[in-house]
Image (cartoon, coloured by chain):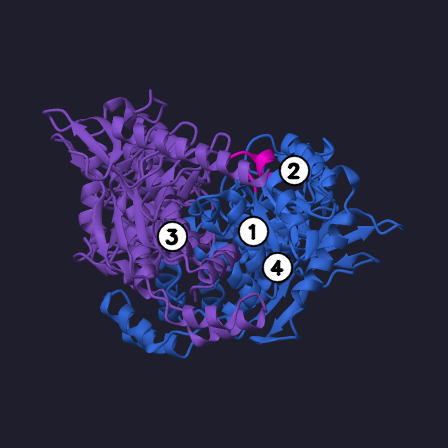
Chain colours: A purple, B blue
Amino acid sequence: MFGPLLTDLYQLTMLQAYFDRGMDRPASFELFVRKLPAGRNFLLAAGLEQVLQYLEQLRFEPPDLAWLAQTGRFSAPFLRALATLRFTGDVWAMPEGTVFFPAEPILRITAPLGQAQLAESRVINLLHYQSLVASKAARCVLAAPQRLLIDFGLRRAHGGEAGLLSARASYLAGFAGTATVQAGRDFGIPLYGTMAHSYVQAFDDEAAAFAHFVRSQPGNATLLIDTYDTEAAARKVVRLAAGLAGGPAAIHAVRLDSGDLGLHARRVRAILDAGGLAGVRILASGNLDEHRLRELVDGGAPIDGFGVGTRMNTSADAAYLDCAYKLTEYDGIGRRKQSEGKATWPGRKQVLRRAAGDGRFVGDLLTLEGDGAGGAAPLLQQVMAGGVRTGAAPTLDASRELARRQVAALPPALRALEPAPPYPVAVSDSLAALARAVDERLGLAAEAAETQGA
Amino acid sequence: MFGPLLTDLYQLTMLQAYFDRGMDRPASFELFVRKLPAGRNFLLAAGLEQVLQYLEQLRFEPPDLAWLAQTGRFSAPFLRALATLRFTGDVWAMPEGTVFFPAEPILRITAPLGQAQLAESRVINLLHYQSLVASKAARCVLAAPQRLLIDFGLRRAHGGEAGLLSARASYLAGFAGTATVQAGRDFGIPLYGTMAHSYVQAFDDEAAAFAHFVRSQPGNATLLIDTYDTEAAARKVVRLAAGLAGGPAAIHAVRLDSGDLGLHARRVRAILDAGGLAGVRILASGNLDEHRLRELVDGGAPIDGFGVGTRMNTSADAAYLDCAYKLTEYDGIGRRKQSEGKATWPGRKQVLRRAAGDGRFVGDLLTLEGDGAGGAAPLLQQVMAGGVRTGAAPTLDASRELARRQVAALPPALRALEPAPPYPVAVSDSLAALARAVDERLGLAAEAAETQGA
């Protein structure tokens, strides 16, 4: 469905220009976020696995090339070169589940210029979205510790791939599972499901709807009880359980989806407990995000799990990250953009993270690859060499465990939902020196050009 | 890539329950938006074509069924029934490009209960996102009339499908084109492209980068001039044009991407004009949305076109619509949800739109299908009967023209970016009477159930 044409036109016209001039020296591009969204204290890296699959599979098939040819924008020799283009570069990246901060590269691609350039659009598209969702979902997990969080957001995610990948990113960030069936199949994520209001409405009688569902899904049934009157429905569940062959164990949970969730949960809990259904859980859903979760949890609402949808899957309070994929080196020379407010750090960089004796993170250093780490942990690891993976991909559960440990090691103020003072990220002397050298070189080049032009 | 498993688990468990009980009478579900996002005055329907393709192609393939079987959640007879499931229902919908308001159904599916239920997740997923983006893009078009607007947002759209479909939805809403190549191939949308900062940086000299690009893309070249110093780069463009065999015509445009876009545009325009390049256009990009566009346009910035990305493709100020797909009739009987704050209108509905003599819309009536239109225009049209389309799909350009006419016919206050008093949408007596009848019937049923339960 998404091939090499899922890219920006300028990638292909730039590649044509590079091809015309034979510019194919090694180039390094790095992907980083310029600044945190308002109110956020950290970000969580996710989506690398899909990036590596994209790079492995990158190739122009004959129909792609035929379509490009008929646009009239590209030369025949260039299109012949595209036909054999494969990704042969190196990739360094923070493992999925790593916490990161502004200015820190989470991915570096070093490859012949055209390959590294071409990858830009889709690499950002994949890494940006999953990191966005994982970062939002991690806040939900922090807000509702020990509660079951389930991704319910396929329907209002932005298209099908967003639905699928947000299930993955939220699971990585600590959600217990998803309602999206394909995410269960593709990624092995635990699946959860309840029932819709339409199911209850299709029956003439709510109690009959519940009874039939429990027969159809014994032990698995989660009954939605807010279609008409929540507490009345809870009493129907009690009566139903009394008559079930399997007893109360046949009913897994009830779900609330409207009104004051905390209030209804307390009333329903009381009704269920009084009716001998202490083992039936209460799930809640409806416009939830980290702030609403914390309100409910801090308010002591007897809710065992939450279906979290739209606001998590769209990261509704901050629907994008201000990220960029920038050229930092070409043909062995550091490169740097000087646009107003958008200047970038040159060179192939590494991020070193220092931790205290108890494992808590105390600060990062943005430095050049090859600089001594001095006991700090280098966050960027080589994951692809010459277009081939350097090892097996970590399992999704391993990445999830890494995310858990990374978030737990954050300074406590950064784990709060409220904005905290920024985590310290320093720039090494070597990197600062390279930036100055690049500026001087550009200044000299500009002077030379002015002289030529005069 | 996205098959029938791109759905919520509960759709399949509900279908199992319906199957167990032989519940397959006709059901009508309608998709509508509950309320407008803050600050918005209208919405624009988009995405119907992808919905119809989904319904036409809906089928479970053997690998899907094998995977479902191994989950242990479904019976073998049910899975055999899924194997032959095809969509055989009717679909009524507002044509793409129709303006709509809260509570108005933009799509109705009437089909055997299971089919209509199963479709829910993906139908919302497709219709919600394109309508969201088209509604946002329409505001950009209103803010920058007569300017070229180009979708630049693939990279930060939420996944690949969002990148592709937001190109379609924004074109439908009046954008001139997109940078996303696959959208050009799949939908015939005009493609636009410029160059990246990395292209300029890969050269030792900016002027050489420009000169080479113009040779490689004669007549098509849009030069990005803010990598180092915008006005200095504009002067390089003037010197370059003087030396070109094709003259200034070989350079199509320059692009600004940082700093005060209005200020730079004025300076650059002056430099280009003084250098004999009055025909070279100025494009601008960078964090644009409808408000920033209006500021620039109203401020008289000499900018001919805008690349609009992230904030449009993610609808950043309102990343989702509060939409729902609700059962309104089953087995000939109106159905209605009464959840707190989420009650819905029962029955198969129609939306009638009245226009004044000059064609301007003056108000809508939410009524029941089959009620007399009294000279008003019925907005929902039948687009599928028995699972087959009733006619050829309109071309994307026809939908774009409809959108243009619909937005132009809005009351002027609703075309402003500022919030306006709501557009009048009334409820017919017949619909209000049906809602009362449904409530009474539910009340009687509840009483009967209490009696049985006692």
Residue A353 sits in which quadrant? top left
Both labels 2 and 1 in a single chain: yes
Residue on which disc 4 sits: B218
Mark 4: which secondary structure?
loop
Q: Which amino acid does label 2 sit on?
A: Leu
- The answer to the question of whether label 1 and label 3 lie on touching residues, with beta carbons closer than 8 A, is no
Does the magenta-highlighted stretch encompass residue B227? Answer: yes
Which chain is disc 1 placed on?
Answer: B
Both labels 2 and 4 in a single chain: yes
Disc ID at residue A123: 3
Residue B295 sits in which quadrant? top right
Can you tell which of label 2 and label 4 is closer to the viewer?
Answer: 4
Label 4 crowd bin: few (<14), some (14–19), many (20+), radius 10 Å: some
Q: What stretch is highlighted in magenta?
A: B225-233
User: Which residue is situated farthest in the left direction here?
Assistant: A357
Residue on which disc 1 sits: B211
